[in-house]
């Protein structure tokens, strides 16, 4: 039923202006097409969309809110983001070793996680 329908990453934030600085300034996302509404920002990301909206429940999710599949660019993306002041999370996960800010596992799987200003967890996966 939904297999051919696009999905949107939807991320709650407390302060839309702070989120805009992070998502546009740090991550480099561009405002997406379509009508913008008060309290909501839509960003294009490849063939996907990221919707950022104001909510009193922002930052309460303890799991990954959005994941970008970045392929072999993961190290350069992490380095660029770190240069923009983005701090990366380090997790103790079975089967993964930490190389700098990138977690590395079997089959050349690599992943890095950071948080936005509200504590939403964002992942970058490559290999």
Image (cartoon, rainbow, N blue to C red):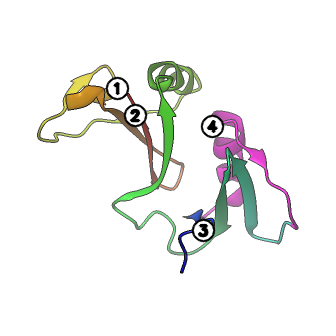
Determine crowd level at label 3: few under 14, some 14-19, many 20+ residues with C-alpha closer than 10 A: few
For the residues labelled 3 and 1, the Cα–Cα distance comes to 35 Å
Front tag of 3 and 2: 3
Q: Any mark on residue 101, and which? A: 1
Q: Which residue is labeled 3 in the image?
A: 4
Locate residue 47 relative to residue 62 in the image: left or right: right
Picture quadrant where residue 12 is located: bottom right
Instruction: Say if 61 sits above or below 123 in the image.
Output: below
Locate residue 38 relative to residue 69 in the image: left or right: right
- Position in image of residue 8 (x %, y %): 61, 64
The residue tagged with tag 2: helix, strand or loop? strand
Which residue corresponds to the image point at 41% horizontal and 67% vertical from the top-left? 60
Instruction: Name the N-terminal-most of marks 4 and 2.
Output: 4
Q: Any mark on residue 88, and which? A: 2
The residue tagged with tag 1: helix, strand or loop? loop
Q: Are marks 3 and 2 in contact (CB under 8 Å)?
A: no
Determine crowd level at label 2: few under 14, some 14-19, many 20+ residues with C-alpha closer than 10 A: some
Instruction: Name the N-terminal-most of marks 3 and 2.
Output: 3
The magenta segment is 14-35
Q: Residue furthest bottom?
A: 1
Q: Is residue 37 visible?
A: yes
Quadrant that contains the C terminus: top left
Front residue of 72 and 40: 72
- Position in image of residue 120 (x %, y %): 46, 55
């Amino acid at each position: 039923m939904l297999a051919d329908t696009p999905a949107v990453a939807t991320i709650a934030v407390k302060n839309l202006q702070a989120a805009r600085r992070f998502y546009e300034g740090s991550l480099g996302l561009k405002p997406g097409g379509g009508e913008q509404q008060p309290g909501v920002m839509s960003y294009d990301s490849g063939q996907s969309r990221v919707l950022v909206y104001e909510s009193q429940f922002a930052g309460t999710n303890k799991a990954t809110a959005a994941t970008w599949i970045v392929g072999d660019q993961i190290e350069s993306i992490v380095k660029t983001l770190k240069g923009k002041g983005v701090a990366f999370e380090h997790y103790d996960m079975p089967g993964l070793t930490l190389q700098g800010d990138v977690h590395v596992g079997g089959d050349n799987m690599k992943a890095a996680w950071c948080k936005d200003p509200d504590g939403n967890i964002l992942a970058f996966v490559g290999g």
